[in-house]
Image: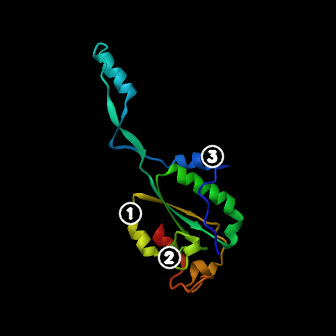
Amino acid sequence: QFKDYDDQVELGTRNFKVALRRLRRFAREGAELELDLDDTIASTARNAGHLDLRMVPERHNTVKVLMLLDVGGSMDDHIGRVEELFSAARSEFRNLEVYYFHNCPYESLWQSNRRRQNERFDTWDVLRKYNPDWRLIIVGDATMSPYEILQPGGSVEHYNKEPGAQWMRRLL
């Protein structure tokens, strides 16, 4: 039984947050307004001191992140670091979707390790659901048999009709 990564870990997430901030892209969207202080000051000065409030839509991080996390086996040695990354990503991105895989993403992924046998998501469906506006982050340690990447039937958990490399090409 694999364990879900904890997205509430705080200690040590600062470096991940700083790195993930570089992925942010802000845009002014929606009806929520905020005061544009610089424009208000300039406009008030042009109006001989008569207050002229200038409002703009709030800025929001528009980056959407799809994160695929390797879990179990050799990844057990990295649980702490992955939880820090996961927690930082959860706090930095409002639009974050997470799926798990073991060793290599194949034809199915899952969102809860407790239900991974019962509630799998077809990787084709995931590819169709998340359009090119989404940024993909794949986290894993690449510790696996070369057969898992190169051969049909190379997976250690199930019979995979297509090699892992084929699925990696589709994802990327």
Q: Quadrant of residue 114?
A: bottom right
Mark 1 and mark 3: Cα distance apart in space: 29 Å
Q: Position of residue 118 (x, y in %)?
A: 52, 79
For image coordinates 67% across by 62% down, the residue present is 79
User: What kind of element bears circle 3?
Assistant: helix
Q: Quadrant of residue 148?
A: bottom right
User: What kind of element bears circle 1?
Assistant: loop
Mark 3 = which residue?
Answer: 14
Q: On the picture, is 169 further left or further right than 33?
A: right
Mark 2 = which residue?
Answer: 119
Q: Earlier in the sequence, mark 1 or mark 2?
A: 2
Q: Earlier in the sequence, mark 1 or mark 3?
A: 3
The crowd level at tag 2 (other Cα within 10 Å; few <14, some 14-19, many 20+) is some
Q: On the picture, is 3 further left or further right than 67?
A: right
Residue 153 to residue 1: above or below = below
Q: Position of residue 106 (x, y in %)?
A: 52, 77
User: What kind of element bears circle 2?
Assistant: loop
- The circle drawn on residue 131 is 1
Amino acid type of the residue that numbered disc 3 sits on in the rendered structure: Arg
Residue projecting furthest to the top? 48
- The circle drawn on residue 167 is none
Foreground pick, 31 / 170: 31
Mark 1 and mark 2: Cα distance apart in space: 22 Å
Q: Earlier in the sequence, mark 2 or mark 3?
A: 3
